[in-house]
């Protein structure tokens, strides 16, 4: 019998994954992992607990319970040849679009500025921006970034995107290394980060790169905290060089209570919730891929460990 192990530390998520996968694959045994559990053929995990890999003698693939895999690739016990399959959209793109649109509208309609005025009890009218005055840049045009870019383009915003490989997306001005990051960043009034954390993207947004954004730009980081150098962001926000930033992801999560982001007037924060994993939707994708792998067919979403995503 096919055995599927759910190695998820949160009981509720574990139970939802087990219930959904058991229903979709009734011939399989689907169980939450615990020390001493029988070896599994497939596993679903965000980050396997210590001891998980030691008992796996026949694991054929590990399904990431998220789109990003940087944390999994850093797991000290990860077997070097184990295929890793990540989630592709699975209900996350819609959430990302909503989150980014909300943040862009706050900038466009000056909500961030009005909140500051309210704190000072000041009645003052500010000029809203028109959509055409608000070019949106999306760094990372993958499964999620492309849908975010398309959504803004469909609403009439000027949209540009940057990816590792060349892309052509209707309504989106596409940049890659041939054009250079500077040419891309210089035209972003709002910059949305949606690329994976890899050796190439870690610390990429330092003082120099943030300085390439137009004066008064707004940063939305929904990718990983490690893409941005915290001190450079704080300096840019303190000086007003950046109007501010919306951060959903951090170098250390939960963000330590003493971190200056918490109380910074130009920084808005959410606790890594811009696009959460939906176990029931994701299980449909994972079940279909397990069935394909069992038939000997290739599946999409296979992580390329050399690229880091
Ligand atoms: P994806 O499909 O793998 O897309 C990644 C995109 O980033 C691709 O366009 C890729 O270029 C580009 N990229 C990779 N390295 C790059 C580099 N060095 N320079 C420029 N572009 C680079 O991933 P996804 O599913 O869209 O997810 C993106 C990331 O979002 C995840 O890795 C995760 O960290 C984050 N995420 C966050 C949340 C949250 O709740 N905050 C939820 C889900 C995902 P190519 O197209 O050329 O490969
Ligand atoms: C969440 O951050 C994910 O990578 O799915």
Image: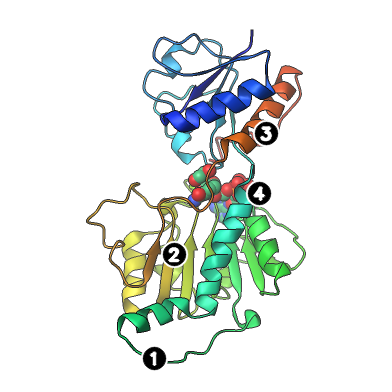
Closer to the chain start, of discs 1 and 4, is 1
User: In front: mark 4 or mark 3?
Assistant: 3
Relative to residue 122, is residue 245 depicted above or below?
Answer: above
Closer to the chain start, of discs 1 and 3, is 1
Which residue position is annotated with label 4? 143
- Seen from this angle, which residue lies furthest bottom? 124
Q: State which quadrant residue 257 falls in.
A: bottom left
Which residue position is annotated with label 3? 285
Closer to the chain start, of discs 4 and 3, is 4
Q: CA distance from mark 2 to mark 1?
A: 25 Å
Callout 3: helix, strand or loop?
A: helix
Q: CA distance from mark 1 to mark 4?
A: 43 Å
Callout 4: helix, strand or loop?
A: helix
- Residue 308 in the image: state x and y as whole percent: 53, 40
- Residue 128 in the image: state x and y as whole percent: 54, 85
Which residue position is annotated with label 2? 246
Closer to the chain start, of discs 2 and 1, is 1
């Amino acid at each position: 019998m096919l055995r599927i192990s759910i190695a998820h530390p949160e009981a509720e998520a574990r139970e939802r994954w087990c219930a959904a996968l058991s229903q979709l694959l009734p011939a399989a045994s689907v169980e939450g992992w615990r020390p001493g559990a029988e070896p599994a053929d497939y596993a679903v995990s965000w980050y396997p607990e210590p001891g998980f890999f030691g008992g796996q003698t026949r694991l054929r693939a590990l399904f990431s319970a998220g789109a990003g895999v940087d944390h999994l690739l850093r797991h000290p016990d990860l077997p070097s040849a184990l295929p890793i399959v990540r989630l592709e959209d699975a209900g996350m793109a819609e959430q990302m679009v909503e989150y980014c649109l909300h943040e862009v509208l706050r900038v466009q309609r000056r909500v961030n500025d009005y909140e500051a005025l309210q704190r000072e009890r000041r009645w003052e009218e500010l000029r809203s921006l028109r959509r055409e005055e608000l070019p949106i840049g999306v760094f990372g045009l993958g499964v999620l970034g492309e849908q975010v870019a398309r959504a803004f383009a469909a609403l009439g915003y000027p949209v540009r995107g940057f990816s590792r490989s060349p892309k052509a997306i209707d309504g989106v001005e596409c940049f890659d290394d041939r054009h250079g990051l500077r040419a891309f960043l210089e035209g972003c009034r709002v910059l949305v980060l949606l690329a994976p954390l890899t050796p190439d993207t870690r610390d990429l947004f330092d003082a120099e790169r943030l300085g390439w954004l137009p004066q008064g730009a707004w940063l939305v980081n929904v990718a990983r905290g490690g893409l941005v150098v915290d001190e450079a962001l704080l300096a840019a926000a303190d000086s007003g060089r950046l109007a501010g930033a919306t951060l959903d992801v951090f170098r250390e999560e939960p963000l330590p209570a003493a971190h200056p982001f918490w109380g910074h007037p130009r920084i808005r924060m959410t606790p890594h919730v811009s696009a959460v994993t939906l176990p029931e939707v994701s299980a449909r994708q994972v079940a279909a891929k397990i069935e394909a792998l069992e038939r000997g067919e290739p599946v999409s979403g296979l992580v390329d460990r050399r690229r880091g995503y």
